[in-house]
Amino acid sequence: GQNIDQPTEMTATEGAIVQINCTYQTSGFNGLFWYQQHAGEAPTFLSYNVLDGLEEKGRFSSFLSRSKGYSYLLLKELQMKDSASYLCAVKPRGSNYQLIWGAGTKLIIKP
Amino acid sequence: DTAVSQTPKYLVTQMGNDKSIKCEQNLGHDTMYWYKQDSKKFLKIMFSYNNKELIINETVPNRFSPKSPDKAHLNLHINSLELGDSAVYFCASSQVIGSGAGNEQFFGPGTRLTVL
């Protein structure tokens, strides 16, 4: 079967750094996406990884290890507005359209 | 300019009724999707259309029927609504560019359906 695992909830402090992990078992691999979803809003795209390594975008970075079926999203200099759910999604091999979605990690930022 | 729009934003209705949700995207994308997000926040794909052709049809009750009049619109009709249909329904679109980057999905604001 196809499976994506993420922690259900994490708590971090404003100004700190937090790493949200995602492990996946899918029928092949064709890319991994991270999305941010604020409460009551739509998911919005954060990052895409298809090759091993780190992709940096401002305060957010995403890492991928295909051999380990593992990714993480790193958020630096946390702000209160970063309180949201973070969704990991994998595109299986042979699929141009379908994503396999994780259940999301709810990140709570405390002052 | 709204990239992916959905109407209505809120829908409250009685069990047994039939309702429709409309979605439009002005991004020029060739693929559109319907997702259901339940109270546990898990996003579940329901349908996908590529250039008006149904390409993903997950295990969904046949009370749910999508319709794509053109590649900018994807509507969802639900017959005989049940309590378990209460959820947030998201429309999304993407432009498929081979198997490379750039085909992230853009989501509409969601339709909150409550069945009483």
Image (tube, rainbow, N blue to C red):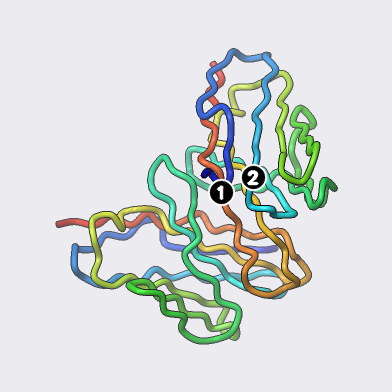
Which quadrant holds residue A16?
bottom left
Residue at 72% across, 60% down: A97
Tell me where residue A64 appears, x and y as whole percent: 52, 80
Q: For this view, does B85 lie left or right of residue B59?
A: left
Residue situated in front as seen by the camera: B109 or A14: B109
Chain holding disc 2: B
Residue linked to disc 1: B107
**In screen coordinates, is A26 left or right of B1?**
right
Say which amino acid is labelled 1: Phe
Which one is nearer the viewer's eye here, B13 or A25? B13
Quarter holding the C terminus of chain B is top right
A95 relative to B114 in the view: left or right: right
Of all residues, the one furthest to the front in this rendering is B1
| Residue displayed at 25% across by 65% down | A78
Q: Circle 1 sits in a helix, a strand or a loop, which is it? A: strand
- Residue designated by label 2: B25
Looking at the image, is B53 positioned above or below residue B87?
below
Mark 2 residue element: strand
Q: Is residue B88 above or below residue A73?
A: above
Query: What residue is at 49 percent from the left and 75 percent from the top?
Result: A71
